Image: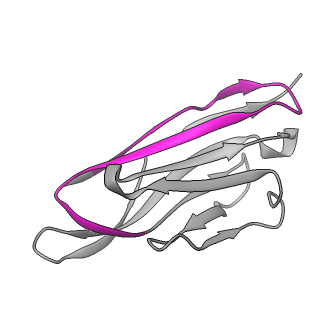
């Protein structure tokens, strides 16, 4: 079994910063892409940022220049540094990982979600 444990959400004022972390653990052989999605009330889940094992990244247009995704392959951990936060960034943020497990089975895993609220 594989678990993704997120941390770092909370309440922040507009213009502030937060750093999300997500650590994968369990029967992991390797991890391909890791990333962050978010879901705001009444909206569909959307991609925020994605980073592949070799380091190339993708960002939603709405967060380019403000958010930075990174990963530590040795620790199976992905980070999301969020700067200049805006009220429209308010959402539950979900960690994602494309995991190849011991035994060579492959599937996607999701974290339980961490809430980010941007408000004055």
* In magenta segment, residue 88: no
Residue under the image location 56 percent in, 32 percent down: 8
Residue under the image location 43 percent in, 48 percent down: 111
* In magenta segment, residue 28: yes
Labels in figure, total? 0
15 on left or right of 26: right
- Specify whether residue 120 is in view: yes
Residue 23 to residue 96: above or below: above
Q: Which of 36 and 30 is in front in this view?
A: 30
Q: What stretch is highlighted in magenta?
A: 3-32
The x and y percentages for residue 58 are: 66, 71
45 on left or right of 6: right
Q: Residue furthest left?
A: 103
The x and y percentages for residue 64 are: 81, 61
The quadrant of the image that shows the N terminus is bottom left
Residue under the image location 27 percent in, 68 percent down: 30
Residue 112 to residue 108: above or below: above
31 on left or right of 20: left
Residue 110 to residue 6: above or below: below
- Specify whether residue 112 is in view: no
| Rendered image quadrant of residue 69 | bottom right
Q: Is the magenta stretch mostly helix, strand or loop?
A: strand
Residue under the image location 10 percent in, 73 percent down: 103
């Amino acid at each position: 079994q594989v678990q993704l444990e997120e941390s770092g959400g909370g309440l922040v004022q507009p213009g502030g910063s937060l750093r999300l972390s997500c650590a994968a653990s369990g029967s992991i052989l390797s991890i391909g892409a890791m990333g962050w999605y978010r879901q705001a009330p009444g909206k569909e889940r959307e991609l925020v940022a994605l980073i592949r094992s070799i380091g190339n990244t993708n960002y939603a247009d709405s967060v380019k220049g403000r958010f930075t995704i990174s990963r530590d392959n040795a620790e199976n951990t992905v980070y999301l540094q969020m700067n200049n936060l805006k009220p429209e960034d308010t959402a539950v943020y979900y960690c994602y990982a494309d995991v190849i497990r011991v035994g060579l089975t492959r599937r996607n895993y999701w974290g339980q979600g961490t809430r980010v609220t941007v408000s004055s």
